[in-house]
């Protein structure tokens, strides 16, 4: 672990003073539900990032050399550490994001699951392949495809899952044999530092570094690493892609989404209402693959809406701490609350109706879970990513209109189709422009690391999360040929 020195230290509010020895001012991290101080961090300078990457580069060959089975042992040790320290991790997630206990626990459970999956599958995914040579005229008798990790992978993540967002990329990169420089969002920098402490405490090789900082620190990471994986907004992703292209640094981008749900008239409406409410409101809607718009066939529109609204009204929202008493928390910051408020206000001003919710409330950055109807594709709530607890619902004449509207978006991250007819679900899924389509389910592609989903269109490029391609994106492919004599 290279989380030594000023670049990676953070102090919690309870522990008191900020990191010493840095010319930079400590930056406060506050709980958006309560305003309480969660901790402070010191942003890493460009020089500190460069020094950390140099240390990672020096440590990486030994990490690669121990092979996937050697790395498996360390990843499983970290898994044990996460289980033993689950409460501290959940506390830190809540302290810096304000999210509910259940959402924080989901992140910890997700982390445990990810560590096990990548530890156990890396050897299989990295195994050399031996394709048959195509033509006997070339004297190649033996062909090997070798997956060789990049030395240092830079991972830049947003704030919606302080632990999980990093884990989804850090763990496969480590399992591939790369060293990792992780720069989490400056809004939620504390939990990744707890995990980095865990990596040090189990005595693992120093191939993981977590730096705190904002865009400038992220830019320094990009300048020094060999591969960049970015998760975040479209404008920032585009800037990062341009920078990587200028440097010839390979990269992948996982960006925004505006996931549609299509409810067909033969759907189980209870299941659809419950699943869509969950898919739209989990993590208070702050999830790139959350459902952000719903298209319902006319014959079942009223009945579906009644069920959806009844279900949403039952949800409890508030500041949770450890009580496990709430389903929704606040938005993670004021900027996000402003976007959600704007989308709802603009929709209402243009003629939309609020069936439940519709208002911000405090103290803290809360916005009620909101069902909107009489919306259309001229409105920001249907076109732009909202990333909040809103469910805009449109009535459509038939399946064809639903598919046309679902595809009328710059995004293509994921989608869902709700139907009682299996083959219809399979057929409609194939007509939707999205990297993942869930039939009679929502956000399931978040929880299953064997699913190789990644965004289409403005939702990203080059990214495949799960399965073999999720691991191999952190590797260069080398073809080795040998002649017959
Ligand atoms: P959000 O977190 O609101 O989605 P961004 O997409 O801008 O917003 O941020 C995602 C991550 O990208 C954060 O860790 C942020 O610090 C980082 N970041 C922002 N600007 C840059 C940049 N120019 N270069 C590298 N990283 C950046």
Image: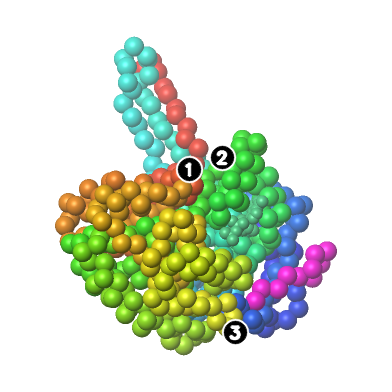
Label 3 beta carbon less than 8 Å to ligand 1: no
Q: In this view of the protein, which residue sits in the foreground, 403 or 43?
A: 403
Task: Check contact, mark 1 vs mark 2: CB within 8 A.
Answer: yes
Measured in 3D between alpha carbons, the distance from the residue under mark 3 to the one under mark 1, in whole angstroms, is 41 Å
> Which residue, given by chain and number where applicable, does mark 1 sit on?
462
Measured in 3D between alpha carbons, the distance from the residue under mark 3 to the one under mark 2, in whole angstroms, is 44 Å
Percent position (x, y) of residue 107? 46, 69
As drawn, 234 above or below 309 = above
Q: Per the image, is 67 magenta? A: no
> Which residue, given by chain and number where applicable, does mark 2 sit on?
250
> Which residue, given by chain and number where applicable, does mark 3 sit on?
363
Who comes first in sequence, dot 3 or dot 1? 3
Horizontal side of residue 61 vs 25, given as left or right: left
> Which residue sits at x=59%, y=50%?
235
Who comes first in sequence, dot 3 or dot 2? 2
> Which residue sits at x=59%, y=74%?
96
Q: In this view of the protein, which residue sits in the foreground, 30 or 297?
A: 297
Q: Secondary structure at mark 1?
A: loop
Q: Quadrant of the C terminus?
A: top left
């Amino acid at each position: 672990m290279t989380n030594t020195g000023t670049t990676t230290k953070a102090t919690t509010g309870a522990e008191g003073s900020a990191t010493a020895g840095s010319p930079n001012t400590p930056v406060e991290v506050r709980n958006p539900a309560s305003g309480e101080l969660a901790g402070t961090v010191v942003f890493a300078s460009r020089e500190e990032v460069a020094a950390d990457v140099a240390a990672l580069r020096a440590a990486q060959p030994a990490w690669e050399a121990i092979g996937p089975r050697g790395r498996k042992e360390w990843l499983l040790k970290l898994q044990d550490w996460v289980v033993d320290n689950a409460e501290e991790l959940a506390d830190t997630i809540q302290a810096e994001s304000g999210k509910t206990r259940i959402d924080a626990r989901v992140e910890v459970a997700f982390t445990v699951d990810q560590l096990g999956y990548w530890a156990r599958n890396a050897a299989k995914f990295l195994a050399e392949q031996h394709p048959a040579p195509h033509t006997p005229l070339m004297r190649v008798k033996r062909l090997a495809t070798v997956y060789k990790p990049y030395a240092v992978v830079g991972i830049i993540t947003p704030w919606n899952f302080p632990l999980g967002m990093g884990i989804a990329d850090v763990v496969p990169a480590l399992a591939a044999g790369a060293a990792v420089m992780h720069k989490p969002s400056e809004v939620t920098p504390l939990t990744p530092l707890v995990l980095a402490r865990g990596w040090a405490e189990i005595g693992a090789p120093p191939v993981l570094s977590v730096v705190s900082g904002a865009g400038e620190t992220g830019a320094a990471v990009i300048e020094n690493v060999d591969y960049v994986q970015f998760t975040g907004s479209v404008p920032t992703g585009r800037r990062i892609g341009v920078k990587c292209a200028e440097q010839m640094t390979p990269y992948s981008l996982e960006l925004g989404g505006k996931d549609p749900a299509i409810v067909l008239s033969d759907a189980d409406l209870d299941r659809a209402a419950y699943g869509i409410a969950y898919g739209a409101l989990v993590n208070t809607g702050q999830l790139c693959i959350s459902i952000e718009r719903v298209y319902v066939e006319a014959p079942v529109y009223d009945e579906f809406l009644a069920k959806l609204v009844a279900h949403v009204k039952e949800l409890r929202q508030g500041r949770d701490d450890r009580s496990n008493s709430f389903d929704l928390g606040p938005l993670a910051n004021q900027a996000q609350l402003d976007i959600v408020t704007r989308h709802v206000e603009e929709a209402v001003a243009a003629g939309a109706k609020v069936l439940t919710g519709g208002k911000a409330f405090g103290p803290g950055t809360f916005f009620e879970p909101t069902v909107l109807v009489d919306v259309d594709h001229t409105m920001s709530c249907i076109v732009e990513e909202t990333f909040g607890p809103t469910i805009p619902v449109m009535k459509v004449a038939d399946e064809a209109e639903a598919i046309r509207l679902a595809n009328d978006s710059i995004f293509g991250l994921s989608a869902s189709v709700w139907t009682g007819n299996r083959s219809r679900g399979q057929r409609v899924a194939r007509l939707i422009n999205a990297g993942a389509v869930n039939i009679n389910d929502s956000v399931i592609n978040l929880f299953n690391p064997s699913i190789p989903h990644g965004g289409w269109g403005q939702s990203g490029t080059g990214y495949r999360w799960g399965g073999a391609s999720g691991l191999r994106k952190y590797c260069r492919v080398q073809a080795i040929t040998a002649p017959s004599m």
